[in-house]
Amino acid sequence: MYQDLLPSDRAKFACAKRAADFVKSGMKVGLGTGSTAAFLVKILGERVRTEGLRFQGVPTSTRTADLAREEGIEIITLEQARTLDVTIDGADEFDPKLNLIKGGGGAHLQEKIVATASKEMVVIADASKDVATLGQFPLPVEVIPFGHGATRTLVEAVLKELGYRDPQVAYRADGDAYFKTDEGNYILDLKLQAISDAPRLSQKLNQIAGVVENGLFLNICSSVVVGFEDGRTVTKDKSGRSHEVNVFEQGESDNLFSDIED
Ligand code: 5RP
C-alpha cells in the first residue's frame, strides 16, 4: 500500500509502522495528534482487527478520539488510566537531546498531560523535524481567552527580557476567528528562529497567569523514531544509541491509509 502514498506520507507511515510494534496487548497507550499520529492510529486499528491486539488508548484530542473509535480501538480517559505504559505522538521539531516543539496541531496541552503520565514517550517524525536547535518552528503557547491581550503583552515582555531580537507573536487563526483548542483556549505562535535557553523560556512563559502551557517538551521524550520515504526507520534514544529497521521490507497488506487527512 505504501507505494500509493505521497513521498512525505511514506516517511510518516514508516515511523508510525515501526512505533506501532512497541504496542503490546494489555498496555495503556497515549495516542498523539497530527498527521503522523493518524497513521499510527490506523495501523493500530488494523492490528486490533487482524491480530487481535487488545490495548486501551488515551487520545490527546477529540480528533484522535474520533479516529480511534472509527478504528475500533478501545478508548479510556486519562482519569481511568492514571498512568500509561507509553505515549506515541508526532512532533514539530526534535533536537539531539530529544527535546521537542509540539502544538502545531493545537493539542500540546493534552499531549503534554498524557505524555507526562506515561512511563515512556516515543516520538514519530520524518527527518524534516530533526533540528540542531529548536525554534525555527513557531513555539505554540496556549492562553486563556480572558484578558488574552494582556497575556500577549506579558509574553512579549518575557521574550524581550530573555533577549530575543524582533520576536513575532501571532494569534493562531481559524478562518476569520481565533483558533480554539479542545479546552476553548487561544494559541499564540512565537516566531523566535532559535531558542537559546529552552528551560528558562518554558518556565518564564508558564509563570504568566494567562498562559496555560507552552509547546516545549523538555526531558519528556524517551526515544524518536525517524521515518524515511524508502521505508527506513532510525530509532534514537537519549543516550545516543540508534537502531535501523526498514518497515517496507517487512511487507504490507493493504491500502487502508490512503484516506488519512489531518
Ligand atoms: C499537534 C502536534 C503534532 O504532533 C505535531 O504538530 C506534528 O504533526 P504532524 O505529524 O502532522 O507533522 O504537536 O499538537
Image (spheres, grey):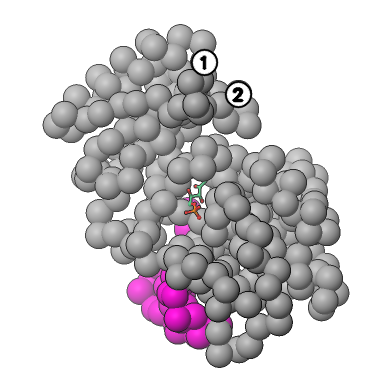
In the displayed structure, 116 sits above or below 18; it is: above
Q: Quadrant of residue 160?
A: top left
Q: Does residue 71 lie above or below 159 as drawn?
A: below
Is 207 or 16 nearer to us in this picture?
16
Name the residue located 52 percent from the left edge and 38 percent from the top edge.
106
Give the residues drawn in magenta, as a range.
220-247
Residue 96 image-quadrant placement? bottom left
Q: Residue flagged by tag 2: what amino acid is it?
A: Gly
Residue 127 location in percent, x, y? Answer: 37, 67
The verdict on residue 181 being magenta is: no
Residue 184: assigned label: 2
Query: Pointer 1 and pointer 2: residues touching (CB < 8 Å)?
Result: yes
Q: Image point 45% across, 70% down: which residue?
A: 7
Q: Is residue 212 visible?
A: no
Residue 156 placement, left or right of 234: left
Q: Nearer the viewer, residue 201 or 1?
A: 1
